[in-house]
Image (tube, rainbow, N blue to C red):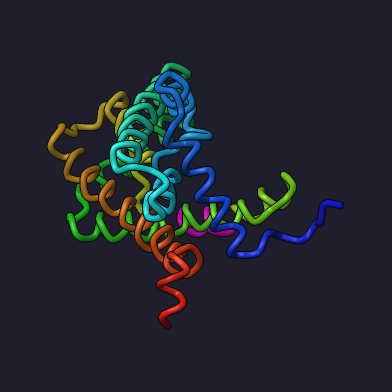
Amino acid sequence: MIGHDAYAPKEIAARVSDVGVVKARLPLLTLALLGLLAGAELFTGNNLIAMAWAAGRVSTRELLRNWAVACAANAVGAAGLALLVWLSGRGALNQDAVGQAAIRIATAKAQLPIAEAFFSGVLCNVLVCMAVWMAMAGRSVADKVLAIVFPITAFVAAGFEHSIANLFYFPLALLLGAPLGAGELLHNLLPVIAGNIVGGSVLVAGVYWVIYLRPAAATAKE
């Protein structure tokens, strides 16, 4: 008989590791198409694959392949969505106030100091990956939806830096006429991506691997 209680933390860790193996070995076309949709294959969430890597179940090449393809596909999908929003005329709503707000947000992001962008990226992906972790504890769709609400709401409300969200904001702002150059965009994106990786891979995947999945021999020595 299937229970209805949430999975225990050690069970979640094992499930995250198992999913990481599957994600790391997806066929290229499948990975790219799912990445375009930024749903099942989201670069920031996929930083949790580091748990399977730390366990020796995924090679460094497989890990980096997933991240690179997912990030590139997410970028294309985000830019495509920005184009659709622009073509829909949403920026002109409320006497261009919506478009001007998007330009202000993107410009502010592009002007963030590098250290601030990095650490904001770290904090963002700690919350994003905690949302994934908590969703993996649920057994039903309702459980999973409820689990992700609070961490995702927290990172949005706090204004932390999410690389894929920024890959939507920047193209939209450019289409709306923002005077931003490639250098300014990279000034934000490179430290934010690095911060997202550290937050998700080290502070969530790495810490939980040490707690729940490190080799039994290492645990026995304590």
Magenta span of residues? 150-156
Residue 134 in picture, x, y percent from top left: 59, 57
Residue that protrudes farthest toward the right in the picture: 1
Residue that protrudes farthest toward the bottom in the picture: 222
Say which quarter of the image contains residue 119. Answer: bottom left
In-image side of 1 versus 58 (left or right): right
- Give the residue drawn at x 46%, y 28%: 26
Number of labels in the image equals 0
> Where is 39 relative to 192, above or below?
above
Query: Can you see residue 144?
Result: yes
- Give the residue drawn at x 43%, y 61%: 204
> Where is 106 relative to 83, above or below?
below
Does 151 lie within the magenta span?
yes
Residue 177 in picture, x, y percent from top left: 26, 27
Say which quarter of the image contains residue 153. Answer: bottom right
Does 89 lie within the magenta span?
no
Q: Nearer the viewer, residue 221 or 198?
A: 221
> Where is 215 relative to 117, above or below?
below
Q: Nearer the viewer, residue 22 or 195?
A: 22
- Give the residue drawn at x 32%, y 51%: 197
Residue that protrudes farthest toward the left in the picture: 183
In-image side of 138 versus 193 (left or right): right
- Give the residue drawn at x 52%, y 34%: 39
Query: Can you see residue 92?
Result: no
In-image side of 60 versus 26 (left or right): left
Say which quarter of the image contains residue 63. Answer: top left
Looking at the rendering, in which quadrant would you find the C terminus? Answer: bottom left
Residue 167 in picture, x, y percent from top left: 33, 35
